[in-house]
Amino acid sequence: MARNMALGARGEDVAVEFLIDAGLEIVERNWRCRYGELDVIATSGDRIVFVEVKTRSGVGYGSPAESVTFAKQRRIRVLAMQWLTDSGRSWSRVRFDVVAVLIGRDGVPSVEHFVDAF
């Protein structure tokens, strides 16, 4: 379990660095409420971007992006609505992205960014 948490934390760090390099401004990381957690909240121009980060060390169980199921997407939307309500922001300009991080045996991460994934 600790290994998975460390892998996930490293993947989030890699994803945030990637997003910053891509021009997004990070607003918040690991925002929590009673419904769950949002990995990354960022802005891109006038849009609020909710980013789900998935990290894997191999593809034996599928690619990281494949684990963002419809149920997970629905939960992220609920969390996003709660964050928008709590922060007093508008729902009109939002986007949901997925960043998939694959960290191979050599320790080198590869990143895929799915813009407006759902």
Image: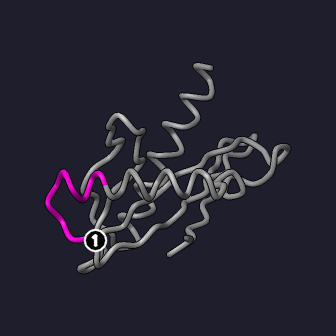
Q: Is residue 117 left or right of residue 102?
A: left
Q: Looking at the rendering, in which quadrant would you find the N terminus?
A: top right
Q: Which residues are magenta?
A: 82-91
Q: Residue furthest left?
A: 88
Above or below, 16 against 96 in this view is above
Residue 44: x %, y % from top left: 31, 75
Residue 57: x %, y % from top left: 71, 41
* Amino acid type, label 1: Trp
User: What residue is shown with label 1?
Assistant: 91
Q: Is residue 30 left or right of residue 12?
A: left
Q: How many marks?
A: 1
Q: Looking at the rendering, in which quadrant would you find the C terminus?
A: bottom right
Q: Is residue 36 left or right of residue 26?
A: right
Above or below, 16 against 22 in this view is above
Of residues 21 and 61, the one nearer the viewer is 61
Query: Which residue is drawn at the image coordinates 66% and 55% (left, top)?
Result: 69
Of residues 108 and 89, the one nearer the viewer is 89
Residue 12: x %, y % from top left: 47, 46
Q: Is residue 88 left or right of residue 26?
A: left
Query: Which residue is drawn at the image coordinates 64% and 48% (left, top)?
Result: 108
Query: Which residue is drawn at the image coordinates 36% and 67% (left, top)?
Result: 49
Of residues 73 and 61, the one nearer the viewer is 73
Most frequent secondary structure within the magenta stretch: helix
Give the structural element (helix, strand or loop) at label 1. loop
| Magenta region includes residue 50 | no
Q: Residue furthest right?
A: 60
